[in-house]
């Protein structure tokens, strides 16, 4: 379904019983990601909770309506909460969606019962770690036949720096980067390659959204001081082998939040919500019960 908020048409799906407490999942990767992975990861929770997944402006099937910024995305999440009359919510934000979750929690905490962060960072300063991890993996990535497009370091760099020239380039290079997000390059087997190909084919890539967010927004992002003031319960989660937002970033978030618990998933890469889905959902349910965001049937 679609609804208009803040002059943008947002595609959304509201799953489960609307009478149950609501979880809102915020996807990552501006211009890359959409609602689909949040749906895949968290739809099992709809036996007890209502789940809202949607595409941010400039992403997926939502309209290409500037401005693109963390603040605007947080305002859109709040407007969507109001429009759909969801009441108080729990946010789950992964990767770049974790940045938006931190922005939302710093602006609209009165509407949160709690929030969950997955493989994210409090500041862009962890970018250097990501580059170092990629350089370490790069020779092996070039040697292995992993069933993804072969990409150059220059192409990889343009994506990381927000300097992509077309949607087609964006799609091909991001597909080539897919093995980096696995727990290890060796774990990126034939099944993982097929899943990456299907996910890439199903997505709609918007390179201009990505470029704006990674040249104008992300380099200046810093939530460290704001985190000290957010007293809502938080569950901070990360995969041990995440190359792009390493566990140290999640540890800093948890250390700064007044009321947070940190969980590291030892067999996961950037997506423990999928790499170790059963264990991940168990921890999410435990957290939600603990903060009184109880489910129904």
Image (spheres, rainbow, N blue to C red):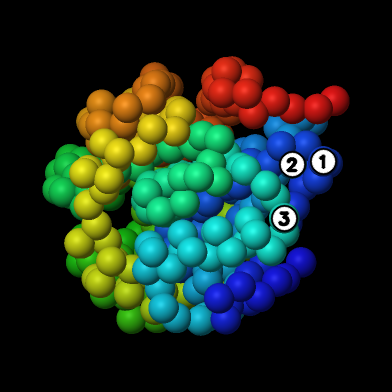
* Residue 232 in the image, given as x and y percentages of width and height: 44, 33
Q: Secondary structure at mark 1?
A: loop
Q: Quick one: label 2 or label 1, which is nearer the N terminus?
A: 1
Placement of 125 over or under 253, stated as above or below: below
Quadrant in which residue 158 is drawn: bottom left
Are the residues flagged by discs 2 and 1 in contact, CB closer than 8 Å? yes
Quadrant in which residue 84 is drawn: bottom right
Residue underneath mark 1: 19
Q: Residue at x 53, y 51 (%)?
A: 26
Residue underneath mark 2: 50
Q: Residue at x 48, y 64 (%)?
A: 75
* Residue 189 in the image, given as x and y percentages of width and height: 49, 36
* Residue 80 in the image, given as x and y percentages of width and height: 63, 62
| Circle 3 residues within 10 Å: few <14, some 14–19, many ≥20 | few
Q: Quadrant of the C terminus?
A: top right
Q: Residue at x 26, y 36 (%)?
A: 228
Residue underneath mark 3: 85
User: What separation in Å lies between label 2 and label 1 (alpha carbons)?
Assistant: 7 Å
Q: Residue at x 55, y 76 (%)?
A: 6
* Residue 56 in the image, given as x and y percentages of width and height: 53, 65
Q: Quadrant of the N terminus?
A: bottom right
- The residue nearer to you, when weighing 279 against 74, is 74
Q: Secondary structure at mark 2?
A: strand
Q: Quick one: label 3 or label 2, which is nearer the N terminus?
A: 2
């Amino acid at each position: 379904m679609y609804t208009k908020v803040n002059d943008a048409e947002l595609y959304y799906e509201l799953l489960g019983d609307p009478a149950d407490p609501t979880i809102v999942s915020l996807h990552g990767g501006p211009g890359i990601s959409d609602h689909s992975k949040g749906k895949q990861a968290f739809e099992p929770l709809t036996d007890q909770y209502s789940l809202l997944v949607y595409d941010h402006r400039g992403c997926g099937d939502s309209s290409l309506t500037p401005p693109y910024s963390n603040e605007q995305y947080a305002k859109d999440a709040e407007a969507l909460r109001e429009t759909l009359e969801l009441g108080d919510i729990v946010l789950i934000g992964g990767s770049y969606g974790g940045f938006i979750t931190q922005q939302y929690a710093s602006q609209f905490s009165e509407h949160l019962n709690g929030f969950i962060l997955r493989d994210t960072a409090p500041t862009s300063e962890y970018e250097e770690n990501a580059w170092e991890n990629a350089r370490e993996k790069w020779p092996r990535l070039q040697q292995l036949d992993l069933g993804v497009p072969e990409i150059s370091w220059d192409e990889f760099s343009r994506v990381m720096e927000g300097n992509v020239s077309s949607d087609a380039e964006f799609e091909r290079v991001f597909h080539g980067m897919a093995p980096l997000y696995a727990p290890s390059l060796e774990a990126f087997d034939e099944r993982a390659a097929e899943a990456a190909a299907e996910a890439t084919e199903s997505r709609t890539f918007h390179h201009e959204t990505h470029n704006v967010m990674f040249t104008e927004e992300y380099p200046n992002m810093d939530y460290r001081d704001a985190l000290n003031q957010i007293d809502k319960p938080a569950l901070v989660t990360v995969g041990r082998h995440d190359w792009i937002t390493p566990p140290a970033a999640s540890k800093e978030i948890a250390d700064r939040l007044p009321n947070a618990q940190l969980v590291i998933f030892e067999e996961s890469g950037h997506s423990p919500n999928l790499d170790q889905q059963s264990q991940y959902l168990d921890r999410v349910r435990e957290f939600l019960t603990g903060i009184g965001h109880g489910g129904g049937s």
